[in-house]
Image: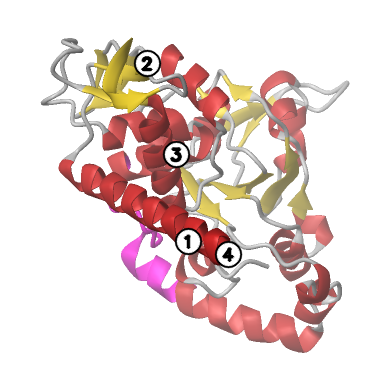
Amino acid sequence: MSSVGICSRGLGMYMSLVFVFSGVVSISLFLLKSSIVFTSVITELHGADHVSNVPLSQMVSDRFALSDLEKKDVNIDNELGNQNIKDTAILKRLTGGSRQRIRIQRKNQRAYDTTLYAKLVFNANKIPDSEDMSDAYNRRVTIITFPNKFEGPLADKQLVRTLTTEAAKSGIFNILMMGLRLIRTNKDIYVNEKTIEEKRLKYLRAHNSVKAFIEEVIDWEKSTEDDNKFYIPKSDLHLTYSIYCGMYRLPVDNFDVFCKRVKKINTITLDKEEIPITIGQTRKSLGEQTTDGKEKQTSCWSGIKLTDDYERELLDAKAKAKAKELEEAGQERLD
């Protein structure tokens, strides 16, 4: 498992929540780049008979799929594919604080109304895109990232077996019951993100890091379509994006992919309001010369300005890169 661990506060709280059938908010848990260790432990704690494995795609498209969630504690989708969630209605109906009765149908049987208590867990390498960025949707989604990989000599191939012995399960269960008492008291679970806006940004970072970067790193109050006032070399913006991804432990798109995605961005969300934007392109002379001595024209993005904090981060990164370049050049001369 990653360093997040089964006993971290967020994961521990969610595992405790699975033992609660009513009276508290229920959420959809997306595990980003997780192994099956975590979901295997959940399955062992509840028993296979109390766990369903209905894929999200079937929940949306198969009218009989929801019947498999009846009388289950948790539903685990271990292979969430690269799909878009165009209709979030099902997820909203299956989560939330108040448990509404939902209509289900088994094949060759009459449909009927029932209450489904199964908590939803999705294991994904990439968070699916969603056209729904409403407060109601973001309130119901929690993302936990597993940033570390354990491969080669660090890999423990017996970890599932180690964590699912009777003694281990008893110890894990006792820890979860402490979290359960907090849930019962607070009628809610602990998450790092204190507001719906923080949850929206975390979701956006996970499934579209370039757009999240543009929203968070550009000073939109000062930015303008006047490319003579504000512009930034495309290589510098990509370097800043790499810094941003490093801060949040996100995978970094290469330069070409990054540029293609920046070109497609025409709206951002500020203060819950979707605002149209224009990111222009231009070429500027920045005092550099080509190999034949001519003035070099550098490809730039126009009409955008980094926030002061990220301008400092960029300058610091470029200074370190320059110092490393000079050090390597000096080493070559010594050799």
Reading the image, the residue beneath label 3 is 205
In terms of depth relative to the viewer, which is nearer, 163 or 225? Answer: 225
251 in relation to 57, above or below: below
| Closer mark to the observer between disc 3 and disc 4 | 3
Q: Which amino acid does label 4 sit on?
A: Met
Marks 1 and 2, how far apart at CA: 27 Å
291 in relation to 147, above or below: above
- Mark 3 is surrounded, within 10 Å at the Cα level, by few (under 14), some (14 to 19) or many (20 or more) other residues, namely some
Marks 1 and 3, how far apart at CA: 40 Å
Q: What stretch is highlighted in magenta?
A: 180-196
Q: Where is residue 35 in the image (x, y as percent from the top left)?
A: 73, 58
Q: Position of residue 48 (x, y in %)?
A: 82, 59
Disc ID at residue 330 = 1
Reading the image, the residue beneath label 2 is 294
Q: What residue type is labelled 2?
A: Lys
- Measuring 43% from the left and 34% from the top, which residue is drawn there? 238
Q: How many marks?
A: 4
Instruction: Report if residue 55 lies within the magenta region.
Output: no
Q: Is residue 227 left or right of residue 69?
A: left
Marks 3 and 2, how far apart at CA: 41 Å
Residues under numbered marks 1 and 3 in contact, where contact means CB atoms less than 8 Å apart: no
In terms of depth relative to the viewer, which is nearer, 111 or 243? Answer: 243
- Mark 2 is surrounded, within 10 Å at the Cα level, by few (under 14), some (14 to 19) or many (20 or more) other residues, namely few
Q: Earlier in the sequence, mark 1 or mark 4?
A: 4
Q: Is residue 113 left or right of residue 317?
A: right
Disc ID at residue 15 = 4
Q: Which of marks 3 and 4 is nearer the N terminus?
A: 4
- Measuring 63% from the left and 48% from the top, which residue is drawn there? 121
| Closer mark to the observer between disc 2 and disc 4 | 2
- Asked which secondary structure carries label 1, the reply is helix
